[in-house]
Image (cartoon, rainbow, N blue to C red):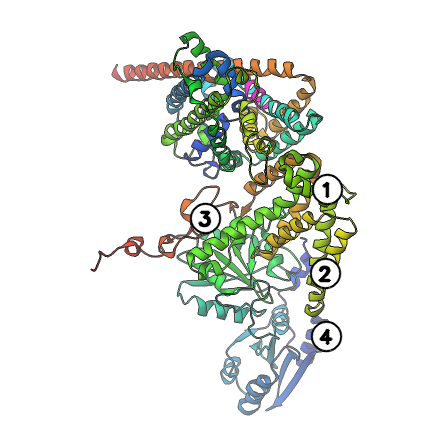
Amino acid sequence: MFKWRSDRKQAEEHKSHSLNVDELKKQLEEELASCSDISFRTIKKDGKKILTSFLSSLIDKSSLDEFILQSLQTNFTKNMTLEEVAQILPIAQLSASNQLKEIVESIIEGSVYIYVEGEPCGLLANVSKTAERSLEKAETEALVYGPKISFTESLPINVNILRSNVKDAKLCFEDIEVSTRVKARIKIVYIKDIADPNNVETFRQRISNLKVDYIPDTTVLGQLIENNSWSVFPQLMTTELPDRISIGLLSGKVAVLMDRSPAALYGPTPFFTFFESTEDIYMRWNMAFFLRMLRLTAIFLSVLLTPAYVSVLTYHYEVIPSPLLVSLGQSRANVPFPPVFEALLLEFIIEMLREAGARLPTKVGQTMGIVGGIVIGQAAVDAGFTSNILIIIIALSALGSFTTPSYLMGTAIRIIRFPIIIMAGFWGGIGIMVAFCFFMIHLLKLDSLGRPYLSPAYPLRLSDLGYSMFRYPLEYLSKRPATNQPKDNDRFPFKKAKEKKDVDE
Amino acid sequence: MKVDLHPRLGLLFNAYLLMFFIHKVQTGVGVVGLPRIVYLDSKHDAWISVFLAGVITGIVIWAMFIMLKQYDSADLYGIQVDIYGRWIGNFLNIVYMIYLSACFFTIFMNYIEIVQVWIFPNLPTWQLSLVLIALSVYAVQGGVRIVIGFAFLGVLGTLWLGAILIVPMKYADTTHLFPILNIDVKHLIKGIYGSSLSMMGFELLMFFYPFIKDKKSTLLYAQIGNLYTTILFTVVTLVSIMFFAEDSLARTIWPVLSMFKIVRLPNLERFEFIAVSFWMLIILPNMSAYLWAASKGFSRVIKMKQKHGIWIIGILGWALAFFVHTRSQMNTVTDYVAKMGFVLAFCYPVMLSAIVLMKKRFMRRKAANAQGS
């Protein structure tokens, strides 16, 4: 972060432009760094000059022609005041200004500046047209079941989706000013009588305190405002699923939307949130419970399996029963490397395959999988590089890490495997435990938006376990998760849901 | 120095966590050898000794709570200064700081010894001690909530180790227990003394007390924690008495680990390798709790920052580890700490609480007299 504005520049900010049309043109050209796409159109009517200036690449041509130029040409008369001019323009977003800086900023955002010569100020009319794609299916957070619509890069569309998802009068969109060089349009979204004001305030304060030149995406915004930037673990979550945000909003979370970013940032998101999928809510509770347990087990195995292999084969082969030890020994008989090296090599190959597959176009990517899986796997065993069992283990742990619904957390899990493998190579089981304890302390120390990162586990909130670690039947989820400290705790009256009728009543 | 300590609200923890915390700090390296140590004194009635030791611990915790209740939100460092004045009080505080640091030292040294005996005979002490100390320093730097949270997760993560006891129970011979109570009182009391080292840790309650949110339920949860420890220890002792033959228990230094040896799963044998590794999750929260309490003294007694105290104790502990070479030396140190602990954790708090009670009563009478006249 750095301070990019000098004091001199700040003084320049409040400067009104020249009242002469030709000079104004020059001033605008100068301020806009003489871009080639700045256009001027001067209309002369009743002896008065009316200047319209705009960036031709940013505006909607037909509305400029139809609503601005045509209206001016037909309806303009000599003695019109600025207010009367505003009356004849059929444009929703109009504002008056004479500040050069403000005008330039609006022009960059796609406004047309209309200036009648001699008047003290002119009109800014918003006829912008932004490039945007249509609504599509979510890509990074693929789903089998449930709504599939995803956010797009356009803020108005995203707001529209959220508004239509949550038709609540208390749904609040709050604009935030960021002192960036490149203006960022950021909105904080929350439901006023549910979300904890502290969470909103934390977001507001951290975002408005930022002093950076450019925020490309909400994922970057998340990195900029989280507390511990040294950790591998993401402390705020981004998602491209609007329904995920709506569910979060109703449980008291706070979201941040940004223009030109197809993902929404939201928080507080403790550790276990990253293992929740929206599917868990759409599915019946028992299936969802099973899947969530499966996911957590898979993650646990993914982190532990390879290190366990390394530690057992390097130091504690007594742990393996003798029949199993024989087959393990046979499969490893041709391998010249120590187990750590073998495991690191294979993990590295898997990571390379994954990365190569992600970078290549889909068609080639599939071939990559075959090449990697069969050719390298089979060949590596034949050549005596690795043992068969290690290949199974590595494949299992790779699979396990892919079950994480959040891509960031999945990556974090894959990365923390490497130090654990190395520790296992040093000290066997003791090394694994050292790493395990370290990560435990580390997770305890982290926080998400000032809330404990391991939340429903520590501090223990039994009622929240139904949301995050397990999944209870819906009638038992009558309280909003206490982790978010919602203002209004009750989702629905618990007693009514629990009322039971007598037999044949 | 202020007697009362008023931490800000964000640092407080709920009283129910105390139940995990007290259990965690009591269960450390001591349990592994507990059955044998008690068995040496009170023979097949060892489990009665262990149980009685737990009961006595409960009484001591009660006395502590009575003492702490007299103050608004004070820890032992403050109370001692309040009772004895600045000089004697701070001298006793420093004694406690040394004791707590010594406990910190014995815990990791004993664990390293177990690791060296069971898994890595050639692992240099300084390496493992460096890592263990570094981890506890890392934890303590996070403050009291991390220390408590680590203890809490440590309990949850190691609960299943207790279930392993079912396996040796299959080979148990109940006749080893009979005749019940045919040991004389002297040996029974000796056994109680012998189990005191394993029961220790609850004295940390006096240091963590100001950080408890709902102080009224302190006693309840501390007693639940102690009750669980007592039951667990009694069961462990019972099972070891039933499992081992008479002489072999006397000769097995770590009976609990030896019992883990027989656990056999289809794909896993020799369970003690896993148990010894997992024991780290039991001792590390202990170490951090003691380190926290000892380093708290730096900010309470000496006008220093606690974070500097953490480093000083950590580095000192690591350096001292170089002076201990043999098992017998370590035994002497452990015995010495156990003696110190018996006085400082069991006897002294009871005495102090009597003094505090008397003083408070005296003050109250004085105040009443002053009002009356």
Sequence-wise, the earlier of marks 2 and 1 is: 1
Question: Are both tags, 4 and 3, on one chain?
Answer: yes
Q: Position of residue B195 (x, y in %)?
A: 48, 17
Is residue B158 positioned above or below A501 on the image?
A: above
Residue occupied by mark 2: A356
Residue occupied by mark 1: A339
In which chain is the residue bearing label 3? A
**Which residue sits at x=60%, y=80%?**
A115
Sequence-wise, the earlier of marks 4 and 2 is: 4
Tell me the number on the disc at residue A483.
3
Magenta stretch, main secondary structure class? helix
Q: What is the CA distance from the residue labelled 1 to the residue labelled 4?
A: 62 Å
Question: Are both tags, 1 and 4, on one chain?
Answer: yes
Is residue A398 positioned above or below A131 on the image?
A: above
Question: Marks 4 and 3: which is nearer the front?
Answer: 3
Q: What is the CA distance from the residue labelled 4 to the residue labelled 3?
A: 51 Å
Residue occupied by mark 4: A35
Question: Marks 1 and 4: which is nearer the front?
Answer: 1
Q: Secondary structure at mark 4?
A: loop
Question: Marks 1 and 3: which is nearer the front?
Answer: 1
**Which residue sits at x=72%, y=59%?**
A374
In which chain is the residue bearing label 2? A
**Which residue sits at x=56%, y=88%?**
A66
Amino acid carrying mark 1 in the image: Pro
Q: What is the CA distance from the residue labelled 2 to the residue labelled 1?
A: 25 Å
Residue A200 visible, this orientation: no
Sequence-wise, the earlier of marks 1 and 4 is: 4
Q: Secondary structure at mark 2?
A: helix
Q: What is the CA distance from the residue labelled 3 to the residue labelled 2?
A: 39 Å
